[in-house]
Image (cartoon, grey):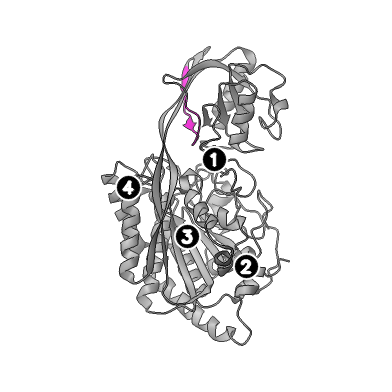
Amino acid sequence: MATASPAAARHGDSAAERPDKTATAEKLARTLVARSSAEDAHRHLKRFQAIADSGGGSRAAGTLGHDASAAYVYRQLQQAGYQVSYDAFEFTYTETLAEKLSVLTPSPRDIAIKAMTYTKSAPEGGIKAPVAAVPVDATPGCEAGDYAAASFTGKIALIQRGGCPFAQKQATAADAGAVGAIVYNNAEGALTGTIGDPAAGRIPTGGITRQDGRALAAESAKAEVTVSLDIRELREKRTTRNVIAETRGGDPARTVMLGSHLDSVAAGPGINDNGSGSAGLLEVALELARTGQKPANTIRFAWWSAEELGLVGSADYVARLSEQQRKQIALYLNFDMIASPNHGQFVYDGDDSDGRGAGPGPEGSAQLEKRINGFLDRQGKPHEGTDFTGRSDYGPFIAVGIPSGGTFTGAEGIKTEAQATKFGGTAGTPYDACYHAACDDLSNIAMAAFDTNVDVIADAVGTYAYDLGSLSEPVRSVPTEGDAGSGGGLHDDHGPYDPVTA
């Protein structure tokens, strides 16, 4: 049984206060759910698409597309009466200049590869070298001993994903003398990732599919395979801004925080990832303002920047909070990719009842999960858990002990037969086939999933605006089966957020 959180105890209501606050909260939640819709939120998606179309095709942090998106959100909130501010920070902007892998001998062909963010760049024209496959075990390529059975000097290491961060894999390969690294997936789908720190890149590193990786490994076991690896990345210091808005009035010692990242990847407009979460959050914030109510608790909304580069905006924000400011935040809810076209309905597994990947969130996270699950149950919407993989902006909040939760509808992970039966859609294909691609545009939105998750946001805002009592209620943890909804974390597919490597 999960106990009540210490944070929840600090923010909880007394027995005498709670009945009145609960009634008020339930009424506001019903009002916001009734008024907030995917149809209304879609107008914000149209605006994000127009901004991307006029700004080079993306809304990536450090570009005019993101600046214009942030200005649009800021103006909407300011006109609605919120206290709005820009939260500026410096970051390392990256842009992929080349990502090409070609087999030269013995069977010439091109293999699709994705450059890892913060990779070291190859010289122009790429590196031509033999492939050396790292033996597959529970932690492939993570320890020096993995490279002892063969010479990797002057070769390109071929490493299966899993067991440790990508940064560790490429660094260990570099120590063994490798001049490049190719990491292949340990699940279906493409492999994208980040080294996690601009200073950590040692050798040019990219990701390929499991099928391509296994084929290369089998081929290299029979004869020498020579490849050309051209991975290059532009890097420069730039400034970008989070948008932070909060209600006027309300008890700041009982701050309820909800967030979504506003930036896209450079490859596309990012309308599902994460225009969807950003638009849903914005629409509910505007509907709250239209009610004219003054919540008892401070409600703070955040639109993060540079999430796609390793949660930079949210991590910077949390790192600058004083101890007192951290203690004032009763909870954090995150909404990232809430309208995937081949969606599942995933709720972050606050109590680790699914038994997958990372452990439970901070005390209180189980209560947040229970509240969302209960709302979805009342709406007749099927759902299942998703692991705290550390790949979205809840990570920095979990790291400092703030109860966290939220929803997600899937990224590049593959939908199972059971999930297709439960949620509809197509088994054996990604939840979002346009994840991190140019086709993540207005046509990449599932309106039914979008509407469900806008309602989840609305119910949470209405409830926690007045009533934090549920954070103090014990939750019985019942083992279940969930899914990551993705191919794993951007750094790798295990473990909680690590502020040192992310």
Q: Nearer the viewer, residue 370 or 360?
A: 360
The image position of residue 124, as x and y in percent, is 41, 21
Disc 1: which residue: 196
Disc 2: which residue: 367
| Region in magenta | 109-121
- In three-dimensional space, the C-alpha distance between marks 3 and 4, rounded to whole angstroms, equals 20 Å
The image position of residue 184, as x and y in percent, is 57, 31
Q: Residue at x 71, y 35 (%)?
A: 138
Marks 3/1 in contact by CB < 8 Å: the verdict is no
Q: Which mark is residue 432?
A: none
Magenta span includes 197 = no
- In three-dimensional space, the C-alpha distance between marks 3 and 1, rounded to whole angstroms, equals 22 Å
- In the displayed structure, 248 sits above or below 91; it is below
**Callout 1 secondary element:** loop
In the picture, measured across the screen, residue 192 lies left or right of residue 224, that is left
Q: Amino acid at mark 3?
A: Gly
Foreground disc of the pair 1, 2: 1
Label 3 CA crowd tier, 10 Å (few <14, some 14–19, many 20+):
many
Q: Amino acid at mark 1?
A: Gly
**Callout 4 secondary element:** helix
The image position of residue 107, as x and y in percent, is 51, 14
Q: Amino acid at mark 2?
A: Gln
Q: Main secondary structure of the magenta part?
A: loop
Q: Which mark is residue 259?
A: 3
Q: Quadrant of the N terminus?
A: bottom right
Q: Which mark is residue 65?
A: 4
